[in-house]
Every structure is written in structure tokens, then in C-alpha cells.
Image (cartoon, helix red, strand yellow):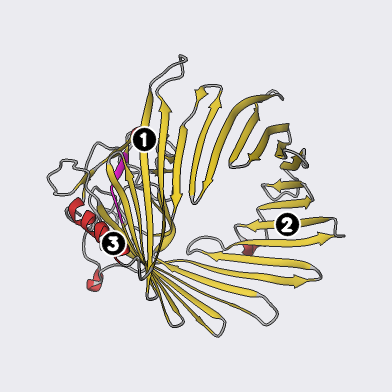
Amino acid sequence: MSRKVLSALMAFTLILGFAVVTKGDVTGSFDLNIQMIAMGTQTEAVQFFFDIQANLQVNVTLSGLTIGADIGFGTTGIEFAIINLNTSLGALQVNDQFVFAEPFGCTLYTGGGVSNSAAGGPSGQCPGQFVVAIGDGDGDGVIDGEVGFVKKRIGLELNIAGITLNNLAIFEDVDFPDIQGGSNHEHDHFDGTIPYDLFTVNNTVDDQTPTFGFGDVISVSGQTVSGITVTGLTAFCANGRNYIKKRSFNWEVNKACTAGFGNDSTPLEGGAKTPLLFEREDLTIEGIELGGIILDISTTFVPLEPISSVINASFTLLDLADITATLTSDNITNLAFDSLSLAVSSGNLSVALTDTNGDLQFDGTETSLSLVLNPNQNPADLTISLESDASGLTDASFALGISRGILSLDTTTVFSGNGSGDLDWQSTSFALSVDYGNGFALTALTGFSPSGIGTVNINLGVVF
């Protein structure tokens, strides 16, 4: 999609919002984020990478219809634009969403079309200084930073006689680059050297050209007269999460649900446009009460995989402590469990015990103590967290929060075990925020580690 077309679309949305300001309700926010990343930590004074990002969100409500625009800007220009339409048609709630974004690559990716984290590359968001725009809007093989159509999502919710029906339909480019290493999206081979061709589409997945597929998620939920909530969810051609730069979405289309499998673009048998694959079935039952114990049970069925289940049991012991036990099993048909966790909280103290392999022996312990220092004058919140395993204490963190008028300071220091029984300092972070009122706030965050200063973030925000 041409930047001119996208700019015209966003301009129309904003103009519409200002045009109906006297007739409709206009709300939103604007945030300006400045990231500074040190190019080195060998000397006291070093050069920094600067990454300036801005986000504008505008929602206009007029005659029961809400039109929203979520627009992200960065050093390369417009990075994403999400257009939302929300309305009610009687008992039916409609949420229509169009997502446009600029494709980005990560120069740290190792290539090969495999999961980047498995190939030794970065896990999580690719660092900004290694993120490069790779959009090609006219198909000439030259990167021109164009913005492309990523997906359309339409959600419907219908509530009838206490039964809630939800349907999410997704039409999505399954090849759109993902710079979230280690995610379920397998497109980490976009290393920034080859442009992404937004000018055309094909039926070949895992290449540098858009390929579109369709997925659908259906859920039904309701509550019995005794207060038990039952929810069933069925997904076709949809699973996991989908990422674009600075935004993520529940559910993404399975790349197998396209007109061709793998690198085979042969049309499907019978002239079908795309295959329809059953992905998963979830059944959740919440609020079962047995003798003062509240049970929540969640079971997941995925084709060709064992049936998994999670059971939560919570109760109060003699009005002294709240206890929650969580039991997980990746093969419930064998009546075997894989992990067990037990959380006990009483006042300011909480303790969590974890059995990671189902042998009924706790492998890890996490203890957290929250205190209010000097509560009568100049109070401060202190949280101490300790983690240990069979070898002893492994991690310790100390978090302190102070508020004075419009100023708030939060700092956290973390120590980790070095393998010899001692704890070494790992990091100390600081977050300073100023709330000026009237929707305007300023926040500054930074951290330090033995290797030096980390990323510095300064955020200016206003809510209207």
C-alpha cells in the first residue's frame, strides 16, 4: 500500500474526528518515547543511539459508532496504523479492525527460515539499532519503506439469555515479517538484506511476498444457576499470537491454511481456495465449590497431541492464609501430572512452592514480603523477593517505591547466584515519573548492570 493512500486514510479519520467534535465524544492519547542506547560502556562519556517513537490514539463516538485510530511513528516514518470500528446492533457487539504496518527485518537474525532463537539469534524484541525497514511497494526489488496491509480482524459477540457467543474471523498475511524472536511466528529469516515485496501476492509461504490465509475462533460461554461458568473454544486455522512492531494480537492464522502448502503453489484438490484445519478445542469450567474449595478446570485438545489439563484449587485455611494449588498435566488420559505449584499468602507475606517434574518434591521456592516503611510520615513501599532451589538461594530482589506529591520513584535491585553459593549483583533499575495532572505525565527509566548502563527511556504522554 502506498504511503500516500495510507496517509489519506488516516487524515480522513482524524479530520472526521475533529469535524464531529461538537456532536460526538472524542477521546484519545498521545505518547512520545525517546530511547537512548549506549554505543559502548568502556569510557565515562560515550555516544548514544537515539530512537524517537510516537503513538497517537484517537476514538470518536458518534450515534453509537466508535471509530478509532492507533497510529505509530518512528525514525523510518509511519510504522503501523490500526483502524477500529466498534458498534452495537441490538444484542450484537461488532469490532472491526484493519491493521497496516511497515515490514521490518532484524540484522541479528541468522537466516535459514527457522526459529531465530533456535538458530542462536536474539529472543524477544529485536534491539532497535538492528531493526531495518524492508518494505518494497512497487516491486522493483528496492527497499522504499512502504506500509502494507497485514490483516483484517472482525469480532462478533452475541449475548442471549445469559449465553455469550463470540466469533473472531481473521484474514491475514502469514508471511509478514516478525521481529519478535522466539515467538511462535516462524518468519525470523527476514534479516534486512532482502526487501519484502508489498506490490503483489502469491501462494508460497515463508518467502518475501505476502501470502494470505483465513482463520476463525469460536467460543461459547454461560453460567449455571449455581454460579459455575462453562466456556468452550474452538479454533480453525488459528493459534498463538501475531506480532508487528510495537503491537501484538491474540491468535494468528496458520500458514498451512493458504492456497499452497510449504513451497508448493499447486491449487488444492477440488478447486478449494484454502484448506480448513482444526487447531484446538478448549473447555474451561470455573467456580466449582466442593466443601469450601473452589475448583477451576481447563482442558485443551490439539490434534495429534496428548490432551492437556490445568486444575486450580483455592481455599482459605482457618481465616489465616489463602492457599492456591495448581496442577498441570500434558497427558491427562494417563492420569499423570507434570507439575505442581502451591501458593500461600497471608497478609504481607506470600510463599510459592513449585514441583516442576511431578515427583511430589518441591524443586523451587519463591518468597515475597511487602512492607510499608514509615507509614505515618513519608511512607515508602518495600518488597523483598527471594528464590531458591535444591542448591540454596538463587535470586534476590529488592524493590522500593516512593511517592511525594506529583513525583514517584521506583527502584529495583536484583542479585543472582554465581554457582558457588554466593549472590552477585545483576542490575539496578530506576523509574521516575511526574504526573502533572490534566492528563499529562512524564516518565524516565534506566538501568545499570556490571557491564554498564542499559537503555534509557523517556516518555511524554497526554490523555485527552
Label 2 or label 3, whichever comes before in sequence order:
3
- Residue contact at pointers 2 and 3, CB within 8 angstroms: no
Which residue occupies the foreground of this view, 19 or 138?
A: 19
- Going by the picture, which residue comes out furthest to the front? 22
Quadrant location of residue 130? Answer: top left
Which residue occupies the foreground of this view, 26 or 228?
A: 26
- What amino acid is labelled 1 in the image? Asp
Secondary structure at numbered mark 2: strand
Q: Considering the image in quadrants, where does the C terminus appear?
A: bottom left
Secondary structure at numbered mark 1: strand
Q: Around disc 2, counting alpha carbons within 10 Å, would you say few (fewer than 14), some (14 to 19), or many (20 or more)?
A: some
Real-space CA distance between mark 2 and mark 3, rounded to the nearest whole angstrom? 49 Å
Whether 198 is drawn above or below 116: the answer is below
Whether 442 is drawn above or below 231: the answer is above
Q: Nearer the viewer, mark 2 or mark 3?
A: 3
Label 1 or label 2, whichever comes before in sequence order:
1
Q: Does the magenta run of residues contain 27?
A: no
The residue singled out by tag 3 in the image is 13
Real-space CA distance between mark 1 and mark 2, rounded to the nearest whole angstrom? 44 Å
Majority secondary structure in the magenta region: strand
- What amino acid is labelled 3 in the image? Thr
Residue 294 is situated, as x and y percent measured from the top left of the image, at: 73, 67
The residue singled out by tag 1 in the image is 51
Quadrant location of residue 381? Answer: top right
The residue lying at 78 percent from left, 42 percent from top is 376
Q: Which residues are magenta?
A: 100-105
Examine the rendering and report whether any part of residue 253 can be seen. Answer: no
